Amino acid sequence: MNIRQAIETTKKLNSNDKALLAHCLISSLETTSDSGVDSAWADLSEKRYTEITSGVVETVSWESIKNSVRN
């Protein structure tokens, strides 16, 4: 398959599959990794989870965010 065929095939995918494909392609470009990145993401995830479950912050739906940007 050449690049043009890949692009034409990609156009037929649904939005979720296109997003996954884009993620995979971008990830494949990363040739070096920072050993602290995974740890930093894990720390941030734990912090956010604690903030949400304790009620310190409230979640907002994606639909609400889209509507506020459009208005």
Image (cartoon, rainbow, N blue to C red):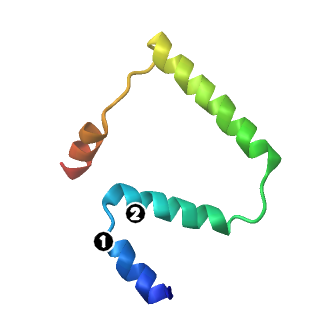
Label 2 crowd (10 A; few <14 / some 14-19 / many >=20): some
* Of the pair 16 and 52, the residue shown nearer to us: 16
Tell me the number on the disc at residue 18: 2
Q: Mark 2 is on which residue type?
A: Lys
* Of the pair 68 and 48, the residue shown nearer to us: 48
Relative to 21, does residue 44 appear above or below in the rendering? Answer: above
Q: Quadrant of residue 29?
A: bottom right
Residue 14 point in image, percent of width and height: 31, 61
* Of the pair 32 and 58, the residue shown nearer to us: 32
Left or right: residue 48 versus residue 69 is right
Numbered disc 1: secondary structure = loop
Q: Are marks 1 and 2 in contact (CB under 8 Å)?
A: no
Alpha carbon of mark 1 to alpha carbon of mark 2: how far? 9 Å
Relative to 27, does residue 5 appear above or below in the rendering? Answer: below
- Give the number of the mark in front: 1 or 2: 1
Relative to 12, does residue 43 appear above or below in the rendering? Answer: above
Q: Which residue is mark 1?
A: 12
Task: Return the residue found at the far right.
Answer: 35
Task: Return the residue found at the far left.
Answer: 71
Residue sitting at x 66%, y 38%: 41
Relative to 51, does residue 1 appear above or below in the rendering? Answer: below
